[in-house]
Image: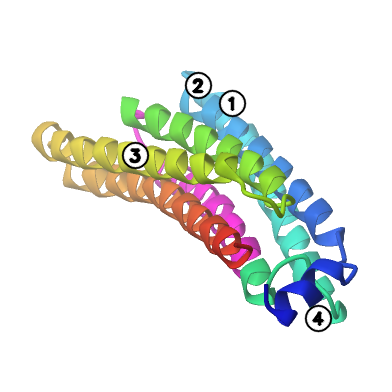
Amino acid sequence: MTIDKLFKIFTPKDHTFYLLFEEDVANLLKIAELLCRLMNSTDSSQWISLIQQIKALERVGDEISNRILDNLDKSFITPFDREDIQALATSIDDVADNINRACNRIMLYKPKTFMVEFSKLADLIMEAARLIESGIKNIKRTDSNPELTEVCIEISRVENRADDIYHKAISRLFEEEADPIELIKIKDILKSLERATDHAKTVSTIFKTIAIKRT
């Protein structure tokens, strides 16, 4: 074992970051839950309330991300590399941002109907958020961590399923939607939802990086 690794093991670390990441992912879970409710709602009168709640929680997520970065500036010793802390905070925020972006598109475009794929993608985003929560719990460990590896594998599977749903939805959209304006609206919403799962996969990549650096 190198002197550098020994130094990292025996030097006290600021565990505030773990608490902040737990707070951040708990907020993300709330956003994902509201998204699922929105995409399964048949009552358009509920849309505005749900979207406003998502927007408010997205701002909470921004505040938590800022607190993580502020602590990064103030902390000398961190529980894992500074660039990974920054990347992890940014990527979790990106998941929430794309959920919020999809909701903004719904408010702006007012689509006539929700494709069934909206709900399917929302369910996958929820699944990814739960896996990210599990990953955040596991990055506290400094030993061999097969659970974190499994989390990363599962997030990749979620992202692959989301890609399949997105591409099939786009294909069906071009086949069935005669109104070109409506087609553009729905395609844009679908893309924002799919991108949320892309950023979830980025989170899993950062988890892998943290795990590799600890071996």
Task: Relative to 46, say whether 210 is above or below.
Answer: below
Q: In the shown orientation, is residue 164 left or right of residue 109?
A: left
Q: Residues within 10 Å of mark 2 (few under 14, many from 20)?
A: some
Which secondary structure is most common in the magenta stretch? helix
**SS under mark 3:** helix
Answer whether labels 1 and 2 touch (C-beta < 8 Å): yes
Disc number lying in front (1 or 3): 3
- Checking the image for residue 41, the label placed there is 2
Q: Position of residue 148 (x, y in %)?
A: 57, 45
Question: In the rendered structure, which disc, 1 or 3, sits on the residue that comes first in sequence?
Answer: 1
Task: Name the amino acid type tagged 2.
Answer: Ser
Task: Please give the residue where the numbered disc 1 appears in the rendered image.
Answer: 46
Task: Please give the residue where the numbered disc 3 appears in the rendered image.
Answer: 162
Question: In the rendered structure, which disc, 2 or 3, sits on the residue that comes first in sequence?
Answer: 2
Q: Position of residue 205 (x, y in %)?
A: 48, 58
**SS under mark 1:** helix
Q: Position of residue 116 (x, y in %)?
A: 33, 25
Q: Position of residue 49 (x, y in %)?
A: 65, 33
Q: Quadrant of residue 26?
A: top right
Q: Quadrant of residue 118?
A: top left
Report how far apart the C-alphas of labels 1 and 4 lie in the structure.
41 Å
Q: Residues within 10 Å of mark 4 (few under 14, many from 20)?
A: few
Task: Please give the residue where the numbered disc 4 appears in the rendered image.
Answer: 73
Is 112 contained in the magenta span? yes
Answer whether labels 1 and 3 touch (C-beta < 8 Å): no
Answer whether labels 2 and 3 touch (C-beta < 8 Å): no
Visible residue check, residue 118 = yes
Report how far apart the C-alphas of labels 1 and 2 lie in the structure.
7 Å
Q: Which residues are magenta?
A: 87-114
Quarter containing the N terminus? bottom right
Report how far apart the C-alphas of labels 4 and 3 lie in the structure.
36 Å
Residue pictured at 41% horizontal, 53% vertical:
198
